[in-house]
Image (cartoon, coloured by chain):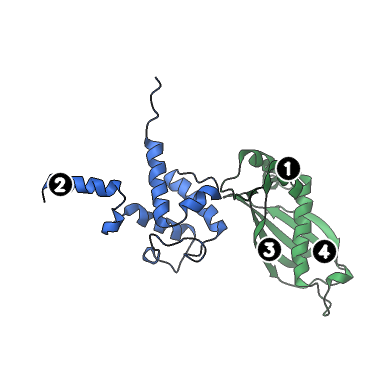
Amino acid sequence: MKFDEIEIKVRFNEVDSWGMVWHGHYIAWFEVGRMALLEKFHLLPQDFTQMGYVAPVVDLKCLFKEPARVAEEILIRTSVLKPTKAALTFCCQILRKKDGKLLASGEETQVLLTLDGRMLYMIPQDLRERLQPLFRYFEEPDAAA
Amino acid sequence: METRTLLVLCVLCDLCGLWKGMGMPDDLVGELKKLIIETLKLEEITPEDIVDDGRLFGDGLGLDSIDALELVVALEKTYGVVIPDSEVGERVFRSVHTLAEFVREQRSAISRPPAAKE
């Protein structure tokens, strides 16, 4: 699976009294990765709103494998699954940069609503066209690979 | 009872939607129950567990919005019917019974030839 990747450094305020990153921050990092990806394709929340849609998260999963610690460099990897229904599912991985160890992985699913709260059971054509470059990017072979 | 009278009664019952009320089998309702179970992988539920008029979402069968999306895809693939959004979905997904009515309506609309232009 192809991933988009960004790097962060664990901040002091993100660790708990045991010196490990508090579990909720991994979810915030998923969000950081997802926003960085969506920004490249002009698909940020405000872009959705301009098109007349909102995309709330309805499902979120996270598996914690190993803790990250303060000042460690972290890689946030994000990918998106080609939709089989009117929902967007992002796959996220959190890795420690120095040894590439997978620390956490998860999935986040968003559904589509109109601004007046009507849930869409099919991806509308205008949005489908806007999403196409994003899916195409993940279908193309990775140049670095 | 004469054959003709029986025939008329059967037609009337079907038209009035009394078919189910008379305890007669309804293949489409059974098919839809199986489709729901298979699509959503409801391994612990059998078609008999799903009440024809019972609620599918919330405190009924307990389906959620993601389940609705899965069902919409399966219904389109299987019966060629389209449920565009939750406005229609809330009416259609009220029960297996309402879902069957919708599929019947849509299928007959699809199979009906377009009216000739004058």
Query: What residue did someone put label 3 on?
Result: A106
Q: Position of residue A80 (x, y in %)?
A: 68, 52
Query: On the picture, is B13 further left or further right than A87?
Result: left
Mark 2 or mark 3: which is in front?
A: 2
Tell me which amino acid carries mark 3. Answer: Gly
Query: What residue did someone put label 4 on?
Result: A74
Q: Position of residue A9 (x, y in %)?
A: 87, 64
Tell me which amino acid carries mark 1. Answer: Gln
Circle 3 crowding by C-alpha within 10 Å: few under 14, some 14–19, many from 20:
some
The earlier-in-sequence mark between 1 and 3 is: 1
Marker count (numbered): 4
The secondary element bearing badge 2 is classed as helix
Compared with residue B117, is residue A47 higher up or lower down, i.e. above or below?
below
Query: On the picture, is A126 further left or further right than B16?
Result: right
Tell me which amino acid carries mark 4. Answer: Ile
Q: CA distance from mark 2 to mark 1?
A: 62 Å
Tell me which amino acid carries mark 2. Answer: Thr
Chain under disc 2: B
**Disc 4 and disc 2 in contact, CB within 8 angstroms:** no
Q: Nearer the viewer, residue A86 or B56?
A: B56
The colour one sees for chain A in the rendered image is green
Compared with residue A38, is residue B54 higher up or lower down, i.e. above or below?
below
Query: What residue did someone put label 2 on?
Result: B5
Chain under disc 3: A
The secondary element bearing badge 4 is classed as strand
Q: CA distance from mark 4 to mark 1?
A: 33 Å
Q: Position of residue A99 (x, y in %)?
A: 81, 66
The colour one sees for chain B in the rendered image is blue
